[in-house]
Image (cartoon, rainbow, N blue to C red):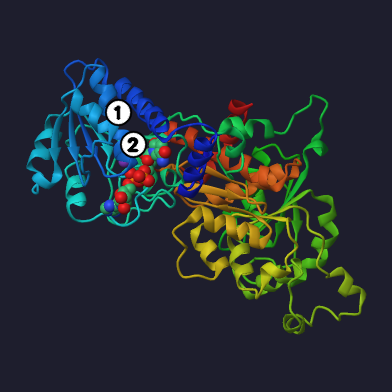
Amino acid sequence: MQKIVTQTEMYALEHAAVAHGATWEGLMEQAGWGVAQVALARLGDPKGRRVVVLVGPGNNGGDGLVVARHVHDAGAQVALYFWRRQFAPSDANWQRCRTRGLAETMAADDPTQTSLRKLVAEADLVVDALLGMGTSRPVEGPLAAIIATLQPPRRPLVLAIDLPSGVDAGTGAAPGGAVCADLTVATGLPKRGLLLYPGRRLAGTLELAILELPHDYLETTMSDLLRAAEVQPLLPARPPDAHKGSFGKVLVLAGSLHFPGAAYLACAGAARVGAGLVTLAGGRAVLGSAMRLPEATLLPLAEGDWGAVGPGALAELNKALPNYQALVLGPGMGQGEATGEFLQRLLGLETPKSRVRVGFLIDSNSDEATENAAPDLPPTVLDADGLNLLAKIEEWHERLPRERFVFTPHPGEMRRLLGVEQLPADLVATACEAAKRWGQVVVLKGATTIIASPDGRNRIHDGANPALATAGTGDVLAGVIGGLLAQGLAPYDAASLGVFLHGAAAARVRATLGDAGALASDLLPELPRAMLELR
Ligand SMILES: NC(=O)C1=CN([C@@H]2O[C@H](COP(=O)(O)OP(=O)(O)OC[C@H]3O[C@@H](n4cnc5c(N)ncnc54)[C@H](O)[C@@H]3O)[C@@H](O)[C@H]2O)[C@H](O)CC1
Ligand SMILES: [K+]
């Protein structure tokens, strides 16, 4: 399992390591040695290769001095460029570099960066050890000018230690600009900011320098990188004597005249990850979608506006729901008033006021009232317009049954659910706090997707892929998660495996079609292949 940490968690881990007998100097030596091995592997034969190490004022700079020594000792020609670091005899790592006679330039003596530009122009490798986890404010002034000398396109290989200088370790933000590295070697554990944009882009390839950290303490950190090893055991077994009933039934309530394709994509997503049966529920628009997926069965429902379901659909739905192990609710269902009323009643969230508004349907004491009562929902994926409609209902999260839903918002839907103009910078914390408060699994979709459980655990999926940036891919994901819920996975696991498989299918699409022009439906045939590859 690859843990991902915040600054606070990392500093606490380092303190715990020291309490367990490690020393700060020893940790820095381990970190610097590990980074130097990566640097040397990139350099090839170090003889005659030129390396510039940019050394900042803190421990990140200290790591840089350790790297400089090891790379020098391996045979490379190393020059040091200091920004805001004062020599002190207690700076043992600087002292060791002096003993070896490494060239030194002070940024204070190079106000126009003329010397630095020359060093960079002649270098094979620049090591960025200006700032690490300690980055606490936007980069500006001389530091910004130093960073600017590393701008692409013509430059040597740039290796950042721990984080590209200027990237916030917690959020990945780089408000004043930051080093754009070819590779970043995280010390000990990757920091969150390395996985969140723009930090992820600025970091380049991610590598790790191993630090000995106390294992039991490590287990208390809550973020995991979502990787094949973590989700492989979650794949539902396929016993040879299985029948379609073994793999669950998914009801997909989606689509409208405006968005018929969303219904198809969600259904096919569920079927392509192995659900036993998929039923498409909805109005006339859904009938058209079903033509594209002859394997799906159909539950025609009373329509509201524009072919989307209306409040009259509840009675039919109530009868059918007990036969299903999962529900996918929302893709392309529109945000019409009647659909909103339907959703409100389905989720048991109607207020006395709205009860009056749908009074033409029911009298609260009649049999019809029972027929139209909010059903007990199976595990449910709530996506897209389902989320937008939910966001309009007052105090929805206090009244919704807890631990029943997987919410799959993109940032716009997340803003609406939270009722804010702009999402907070720390997306991981935002998703985690929401999951805890709402009592539901939250999948905050983006170039980096965050899967947060109400119990505080979270998984981060490093799966940016421009091929996915096209309409309909979210509908496929909702279906995929629904298909896994129907096969008995717990919501957090269904969401995690679903995000992983969706990302793996997208990687396969990109490998054949490239960055542009893929259709969401191209993901569908790749889903079983992604499962096969994972199994
Ligand atoms: N702690 C350990 O045992 C280990 C840490 N490792 C490395 O240490 C850094 C974190 O070091 P720290 O000294 O806490 O912070 P920095 O080196 O990142 O720099 C802090 C320094 O910079 C100033 N500062 C912050 N932001 C700005 C800014 N935008 N402009 C100007 N100055 C800024 C701040 O005030 C401080 O003075 C960690 O990343 C690792 O690389 C070892 O890896 C392991 C042991
Ligand atoms: K750095």
First in sequence: mark 1 or mark 2?
1
Q: Which quadrant does the N terminus fall into?
A: top right
Residue 430 - label: none
Q: Which residue is identified by label 1?
A: 67
User: Please, what is the three-letter code of the amino acid marked with disc 1?
Assistant: Val
Count every numbered label the image shows and give the total: 2
Q: Which residue is identified by label 2?
A: 161
Whole-percent x, y for residue 434 in the image: 60, 60
**Lateral position of residue 324 relative to residue 288, left or right:** right
**Lateral position of residue 386 relative to residue 276, left or right:** left
* CA–CA distance in space, label 1 to label 2: 9 Å
Q: Crowdedness of circle 1 by 10 Å Cα count: few (<14), some, many (20+)?
A: many
Quick check: 453 above or below 362? Answer: above
Secondary element under disc 2, as helix, strand or loop, is strand
**Lateral position of residue 460 relative to residue 132, left or right:** right
> What residue do we see at 78% from left, 42% from top?
248
Are circles 1 and 2 on residues that touch, CB within 8 Å?
A: yes
User: Please, what is the three-letter code of the amino acid marked with disc 2?
Assistant: Ile
**Residue closest to the eye, 504 or 397:** 397
> What residue do we see at 9% from left, 49% from top?
111
Q: Crowdedness of circle 2 by 10 Å Cα count: few (<14), some, many (20+)?
A: many
Outermost residue on the front side: it is 89
Residue 227 visible in rendering: yes
CB of residue at label 2: within 8 Å of ligand 2? yes
Q: Which quadrant does the C terminus fall into?
A: top right
> What residue do we see at 72% from left, 81% from top?
354
Secondary element under disc 1, as helix, strand or loop, is helix
Can you tell me which quadrant of the image ligand 2 is in? top left
Instruction: Report which quarter residue 337 is drawn in.
Output: bottom right
Whole-percent x, y for residue 385 in the image: 59, 63
Whole-percent x, y for residue 227 in the image: 55, 34
**Residue closest to the eye, 26 or 109:** 26
